[in-house]
Image: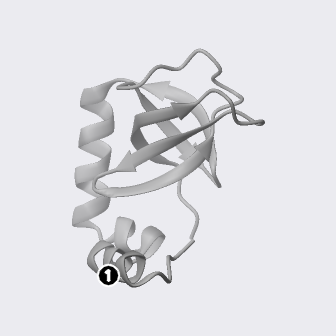
Amino acid sequence: MCLAVPGKVVSIDHRADPLTGLIDFGGVRKQACLEYLPDVRVGEYVIVHVGFALQRLDEQSARASLELFGQLGLLEEEFGDAWEQAERQESGSEVR
C-alpha cells in the first residue's frame, strides 16, 4: 500500500534540481521532492505521496494522523522497521 503520509520538513536543499527536502515521518526520515510547494519552510508539515510533498498540513492534524497510522501499523508497513533501517544505515547498506 502506498499512503499519503504527513511529515515535518527537517531541511531543504535549495541547490537541488528538483527542489528536495528531508522529511521526518514520526522518526523515519526520507528525502522528498518539494517542487509542488516551493515556498515550504523548515518546521512545516506536508503530506507526501510517492516521494512528492503535495500540500501543507497543520501540526495538530499531522501528529494525529501519524499517531493513528502508527497504531494501525501503517507506518511500519509503509517504511519498514525504523530500528532495522538505522542498523542498516550504520553498517553502510542504507535502505532506500
Left or right? Give the position of 27 relative to 13: left
**Which residue is at 38% across, 67% downward?**
74
Q: Is residue 80 above or below residue 72?
A: below
Of the pair 78 and 1, the residue shown nearer to us: 78
Residue 3, given in percent of the width and then of the height, sits at: 53, 58
- In the visual, does 4 lie left or right of 73? right
Q: Position of residue 32 (x, y in %)?
A: 59, 46
Residue 63 x, y percent position in the rendering: 25, 40
Q: Amino acid at mark 1?
A: Glu
Rendered image quadrant of residue 29: bottom left
Label 1: which residue? 87
Q: Can you give x and y, in whole percent of width and height, for residue 73 in the image?
A: 31, 72
Counting the numbered discs, the total is: 1
Viewer-proximal residue among 42 and 14: 14
Establish if 19 lies above or below 81.
above
Residue 2 falls left or right of residue 22: right
Q: Quadrant of the C terminus?
A: bottom right
The N terminus sits in image quarter: bottom right
- In this rendering, would 89 be left or right of 86? right
For image coordinates 77% across by 36% down, the residue present is 17
Mark 1: few, some, or many residues within 10 Å (few <14, many ≥20)? few
Question: In the displayed image of the protein, which residue is found farthest to the top?
Answer: 39
Is the residue 70 above or below the residue 43 in the image? below
Q: Residue at x 31, y 72 (%)?
A: 82
Secondary structure type for disc 1 = helix
